Amino acid sequence: MIADAHRRKAERIERTLAKLEPTDYEMRIDGAVLAASHYANLALHRLGIVPETHDIIHTEFLEVIDYRRLEVAAGVLVEALEAIEELRAPFVRGAASGGAEAGERALALLARVREAAMKVEPIAVALPKYTPRK
Amino acid sequence: MEIATHREKIERLTDLLTRLEPVEDFEIWMWASMTAATNALNAALHHLGVTEPGKLYPHQIPGLYVEPQPVEEWHWRKVFAAPGDVIHLGLPPLAGTIPDGVFEAAKALAVIEDMREEYVRGAQPIGPQLVDQCAAAYRSCMTILEDILAGPPGGVS
């Protein structure tokens, strides 16, 4: 999906997130993950690390080589996105105490992801395609 | 999680569904439906004795669970564990017999889950027909699972 389509989709999800209450923390967290993943894809495409023909769902599904490149190019984004993901097991699929605070944290982290994604510029050098010899 | 905890989550998610506009808010609306249905699926599996309501919470990487208490602020220890709650039917795989009703419910849940790629992670147009399809699958899934939960517990080996 093209970078601008990811931005529009993320913004659409964020409009819904603005309607949620603190007690809706599961969807604040998962919605933040969804919007942040669109921003991450936007960044990956704009940086030139991953082509627009290929989107990622979670950072775990990135090839390690591309993950390392993203960490260098947009470390704040990776850190914030993974911090949102960290909230899913205890608060969305689990019942850890402090769900409302976790929901607030997810929204704050999403803002960091958005800010970092909107700042990225294409990597100035051609990234070598590297496949290890077997 | 205990059945009562799944039910409490279902109640809050169901309340949220009534506050959202299904077309305009589709992404979160369908996700809330899917999450409520997954909670009902886990509750039904516990009720039937297929899975135990364990103390660990499932991670998105199948086979990994997290402990309920954080090891430091906003960090939880990840461990390998046998299925308590599942994230989808078959993730992780379950031992023992799965009753037909659960399969039927999971089939309806899969209709909702399959909408994620095109309409949530992708940008295919969202309209009333899609909403109706999602709502019908949700109703069907929840009806089956509520029936299971209203029936006798256990009985599956």
Image (cartoon, coloured by chain):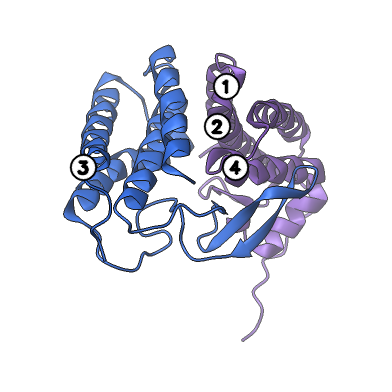
Q: Position of residue B59 (x, y in %)?
A: 56, 53
Dot 4 and dot 1 residues touching (CB under 8 Å): no
Give neighbour class at mark 3: few <14, some 14-19, many 20+ (Cα, 10 Å): few
Give neighbour class at mark 4: few <14, some 14-19, many 20+ (Cα, 10 Å): many
The residue drawn where x is 42% and y is 57% is B52
Give the letter of the purple chain: A
What residue sits right under mark 2 in the picture?
A26
Vertical comparison of B56 with B29: above or below: below
Q: Which mark is residue B144?
A: none
Dot 3 and dot 2 within a common chain: no
Give neighbour class at mark 1: few <14, some 14-19, many 20+ (Cα, 10 Å): some
Vertical comparison of B121 with A101: above or below: below
Q: CA distance from mark 4 to mark 3?
A: 31 Å
Residue B58 in sight from this viewpoint? no
Dot 3 and dot 2 residues touching (CB under 8 Å): no
**Which image quarter holds the C terminus of chain B?**
bottom left
Front residue of B128 and A130: B128
Amino acid beneath label 2: Glu
Q: CA distance from mark 4 to mark 1?
A: 15 Å
Dot 3 and dot 1 within a common chain: no
Q: Secondary structure at mark 4?
A: helix
Q: Chain of mark 1?
A: A
Give the letter of the blue chain: B
What residue sits right under mark 3 in the picture?
B151
